[in-house]
Image: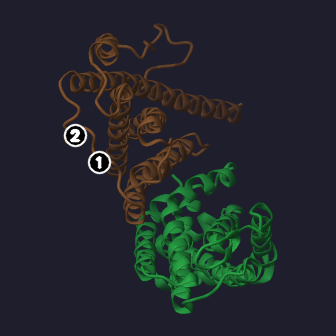
Amino acid sequence: MIESPNLTPSSPTPPNLSTASKATRIIGWAALAVTGLALLFGLVISGPEVNMRDSVRLLYVHVPSILTAYTCFGITLVGSVMYLRTQSQFWDLAAASAAEVGVVFLGLGLVTGALWGKPTWGTYWEWDPRLTSTAVMFIMYIGYLAIRRMEFSPEVRSRRAAVVGIISILNVIIVHYSVQWWRGLHQGQTFGLDPQIRDMQYFSWFLGTVAMALVASWLLIHRFRVSWLERQVEESQLVRALAERRREAGE
Amino acid sequence: MLHDAWIMARKDLRIEWVTRVATGQVLPFGALVLILFGLALNPDLVIVGEQRRSILAQVAPGLFWITVLLASLLALGRSFALEANDGNVDALKMAGLDPAGVFLGKAMAVAAQLLAIEVVLGFGAFVLYGTPLANFVMLVCAVILATVGVAAAGTLYAGIASGLRARDTLVPLLVLPILSPVLLAATLSTEAAVFGGSGGWSWVMLLGVFAVIYLGVGMLAFGLVMEET
């Protein structure tokens, strides 16, 4: 259990309410620097690809953002399971923060994917397993975030959100395989298998991945700390309200 | 647990028998949706292929299942509105009912109501859309298994959203993505059943797998969902 700061106005020394720390500042500057490098390599130094031409540059954003989103939802799954096991606020808030960051990156991934699909496949959207399950996943995690905003007591909200956080992953797998059974093939993994992408293009993609990972970590840590402060405010308001009721009852 | 489920299901169905919400409101709503689809998709448009068939008849299986999903949202909302007042959830716990039994019972009651509604809507779809029927047994199996899946997943998620003012808007957002694979498998197996064609039974089996998964997950998770503190 994390110790709560004293948030009452009468406290003599104001508590440190900043969500920044030395570590996040380093991550933040590193994220800016690597993003700058990724832009330089992705847009200027690396050349167009043989088949995809310049649209390959979209993949330096698209693939890293999808990977980042999947990682975030992985954290949500782990956080949800661990919350149900330990009832620890840490895991609950980690799951919530990761889902929020994940939704942002998944949205970015869907948009860049559609923009990439138009010149490559000739269409913004294909009803293939990966795209369809990703779209369903996007909506599902928006639903998860909706639960997190509901007016339950904190424990009930955390518990129900954890259940949804676990079932959502299960459902993504089910949707993926049922659509796969229904439809044909995605073009397969572009990286690792496709020999057309190499050298500078590969390096640009690598830089994009590192930049995304740093930005996501920075957002995640800050979001976690903001959620934690929100929770403290929520609880201190409850404590204050209870104290007031008691005083009224005593008078 | 099965005994508790039976008690719950009987209670919900008895309330339905007295209040007639499913037959008096949800069913007419479903019929209305079927008619609206007819207006939205020009019934005179014909697909000229091996068999001349109207667009409506061609897409009837999908329209039927979309209608069922929309109707199920109302049935689920009703199922948990019954427990919303007068501390009913506490009363259920005080009565010592097994949460898995409560889940199973509510899902059974929802499934029974949906099945009754589906029979009528199915006739409606045949009459209004002019759909053929190739394999009646497959159709019945698909409808029953899909309905169990819809009721199980829906009951779990309606339980998660229960006790909230925003329940009515939250349940569709949570339930429909979960039911998207059921919609897919139900539509494909129904297509195979009405038009004839191969591969229908494998989709029916997949519906069975979904039903078992959702029932299992629901029975495991419902206890956590129902705890109030």
**Residue at image mark 2:** A194
Image-quadrant location for residue B54? bottom right
In-image side of A46 versus A246 (left or right): left
Residue contact between numbered discs 2 and 1, judged by CB atoms under 8 Å: yes
**Left or right: where B20 falls relative to A147:** right
Please report, as a chain letter, where disc 1 is located. A
The location of residue B132, given as percent across then percent down, is 64, 85
The residue drawn where x is 66% and y is 77% is B52
Residue A188, numbered label: 1
Residue closer to the observer: A34 or A229: A34
In the figure, the green chain has which letter?
A: B
Q: Chain of mark 2?
A: A
Residue at point 60%, 81% (across, down): B9
Q: Residue B26, relative to residue B17: is it above or below?
A: above
Please, what secondary structure does the residue beneath circle 1 have? loop
Chain identifier matching the brown colour in the rendered picture: A
In which image quadrant can residue B26 be found? bottom right
Above or below B22: residue A227: above
